[in-house]
């Protein structure tokens, strides 16, 4: 039998991956930004080996694109990617809500309520990072309490990308208006009352509107890049 001794570098790679994942989600690295392995290794005080492992894990999560002989970059979704991502969420989140209601209604309500409680001061402070984290916690609560690990694991495949897009593109708008905040409160109310037809309708609108914001923001960034090339 092979040894089951723990591999310390893998543990280190996991810590590096988790910190980089949060940095991407929080917008410390912009969408499409280059991530220097040497810079990360120096910042963490580690060799490049755990950094490479971390990059590989982030690539598997869709947060990083590794281009051989070129470098590693934060993902940049296309319009087709955004549409597919929103369709995926619209299919999964209402179902997760129904399962969460049956499996752990009180626990789900508590988690969603805590997320909304964190949103309000973020809106007041115009803190898009805090708002984005609370927004992510709200949606993740449905999967954390749904009682179906396959559904939860499916959402984990895209949750990092959703969170990064949210912080980079929608949260700066959400903290300037109360539309998103009010929608989350309404979603919680519909969930608590078990009104899932109305919940699904509102969730579909909520996710679709986010997709529209993503697409517009990416188009604006593309125009800026073109302008710089021309200049």
Image (tube, rainbow, N blue to C red):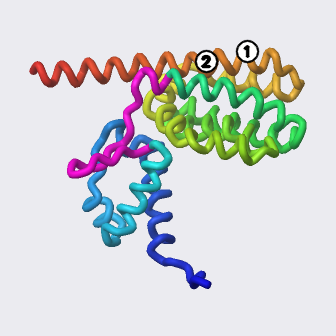
Q: Residue at x 86, y 20 (%)?
A: 195
Whether 86 is drawn above or below 149: the answer is: above
* Magenta-span inclusion, residue 83: no
Q: Is residue 42 left or right of residue 107?
A: left
Give the residue number, with chain letter if any, for mark 2: 179
Asked if disc 2 and disc 1 are in contact, CB closer than 8 Å, the reply is: no
The N terminus sits in image quarter: bottom right
Residue stretch in magenta: 63-82
Residue lying at the far left of the rendered structure: 231
Q: Residue at x 49, y 16 (%)?
A: 212
Please state which of residues 218 and 72 is positioned toward the viewer in this rendering: 72
Please state which of residues 101 and 66 is positioned toward the viewer in this rendering: 66
Q: Name the spot of residue 150 as percent of width and height, x first.
A: 72, 45
Q: Is residue 21 left or right of residue 227?
A: right
Whether 70 is drawn above or below 166: the answer is: below
Whether 121 is drawn above or below 83: the answer is: below
Q: Is residue 181 left or right of residue 185?
A: left
Task: Give the structural element (helix, strand or loop) at label 2.
Answer: helix
Q: Name the spot of residue 86 as percent of width and height, x first.
A: 57, 24
The C terminus sits in image quarter: top left
Give the residue number, with chain letter if any, for mark 1: 201
Measure the C-alpha gap from mark 2 to mark 1.
16 Å
Q: Residue at x 74, y 45 (%)?
A: 144
| Badge 2 or badge 1: first in the primary sequence | 2
Mark 1 is surrounded, within 10 Å at the Cα level, by few (under 14), some (14 to 19) or many (20 or more) other residues, namely few
Task: Give the structural element (helix, strand or loop) at label 1.
Answer: helix
């Amino acid at each position: 039998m092979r040894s089951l001794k723990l591999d310390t570098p893998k543990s280190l790679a996991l810590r590096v991956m988790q910190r980089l994942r949060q940095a991407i989600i929080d917008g410390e690295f912009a969408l499409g930004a280059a991530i220097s392995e040497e810079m990360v290794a120096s910042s963490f005080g580690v060799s490049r080996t755990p950094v490479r492992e971390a990059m590989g894990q982030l690539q598997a999560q869709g947060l990083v694109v590794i281009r051989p002989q070129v470098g590693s970059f934060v993902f940049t979704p296309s319009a087709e990617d955004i549409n597919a991502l929103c369709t995926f969420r619209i299919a999964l989140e209402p179902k997760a809500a129904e399962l969460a209601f049956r499996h752990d209604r009180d626990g789900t309500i508590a988690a969603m309520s805590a997320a909304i409680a964190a949103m309000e001061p973020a809106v007041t402070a115009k803190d898009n990072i805090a708002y984005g984290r609370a927004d992510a916690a709200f949606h993740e609560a449905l999967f954390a309490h749904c009682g179906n690990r396959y559904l939860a694991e499916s959402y984990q495949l895209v949750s990092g990308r959703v969170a990064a897009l949210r912080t980079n593109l929608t949260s700066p708008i959400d903290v300037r208006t109360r539309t998103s905040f009010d929608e989350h409160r309404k979603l919680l109310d519909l969930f608590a009352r078990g009104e899932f037809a109305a919940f699904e309708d509102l969730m579909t609108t909520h996710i679709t509107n986010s997709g529209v914001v993503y697409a517009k923001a990416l188009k604006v960034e593309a125009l800026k890049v073109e302008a710089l090339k021309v200049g």
